[in-house]
Image: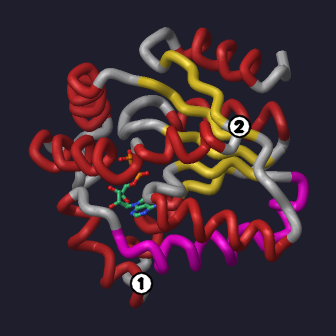
Amino acid sequence: MRLILLGPPGAGKGTQAQFLTEKFDIPQLSTGDMLRAAIAAETELGLKVKDMIARGDLVPDEIVVGIISDRIDESDCANGFILDGFPRTTGQAEALDDLLDEKGISLDAVVEIRADADILVGRILQRAKENGGARADDNEEVLRNRLDVYQEMTAPLVEYYSAKGLLKSVDGMAGIEEVTASIMSALNAD
Ligand SMILES: Nc1ncnc2c1ncn2[C@@H]1O[C@H](COP(=O)(O)OP(=O)(O)O)[C@@H](O)[C@H]1O
């Protein structure tokens, strides 16, 4: 099963990805986690992207496309994977199509978790408080920027994947288990 989870920051992609990982025994590939790991390890890449992430801006397409292409080649992706936070631009989606073609594989579905931006701000600020503000980009100003960037750069992917007949949309404002159930039924896997 090769899936994309699409949705604004705080919509619950990470939570649902964890569940899907167990259910289908496939890894969750989160570009956000990978970039934060690079920052923590102070690699060349990490130093390059640190300020962009802190501002809530996107990092250049070629960086995340390269990371994902290499990651998909690893053996634990042989049975599939869940892309969480990638693609985030039409350019990334097109690059993903090309690289999947080259690898001779294709996507099974794109799950859009729909959520209301104003409610998400409250959710994420709450998460930041509970984690002691663990993420540098979880303050209100940066968060509003992340939501604006989502609307402008990433929301067009809903139409992109809908046109390919891959899109399944679920209501992300329901409880966690209800959202999981909607995803399973959208994938005909319950
Ligand atoms: N596919 C991507 N393209 C560009 N930038 C990305 C991508 N994935 C992650 N990032 C960077 O990492 C940040 C955090 O990503 P992520 O953990 O997915 O956050 P969110 O909770 O906002 O969905 C983004 O705001 C962006 O700066």
Q: Amino acid at mark 1?
A: Leu
Quarter holding residue 129 = top left
Label 2: which secondary element: loop
Q: Position of residue 182 (x, y in %)?
A: 66, 15
Q: Residues within 10 Å of mark 1 (few under 14, many from 20)?
A: few
Q: Residue at x 21, y 23 (%)?
A: 118
Q: Amino acid at mark 2?
A: Gly
Q: Residues within 10 Å of mark 2 (few under 14, many from 20)?
A: few
Foreground of the two, 164 or 114: 164
Quarter holding residue 176 = top right
Q: Is residue 143 above or below residue 72?
A: above
Q: Earlier in the sequence, mark 1 or mark 2?
A: 1
Please give the residue where the numbered disc 2 appears in the rendered image.
Answer: 165
Q: Which residues are magenta?
A: 59-79
Q: Quadrant of ligand 1?
A: bottom left
Please give the residue where the numbered disc 1 appears in the rendered image.
Answer: 45
Quadrant in which the N terminus appears: top right
Q: Residue farthest to the left?
A: 141
Q: Residue farthest to the bottom?
A: 44
Q: Position of residue 9 (x, y in %)?
A: 36, 39
Foreground of the two, 45 or 1: 1
Q: Residue at x 81, y 56 (%)?
A: 106
- Report how far apart the C-alphas of labels 1 and 2 lie in the structure: 35 Å
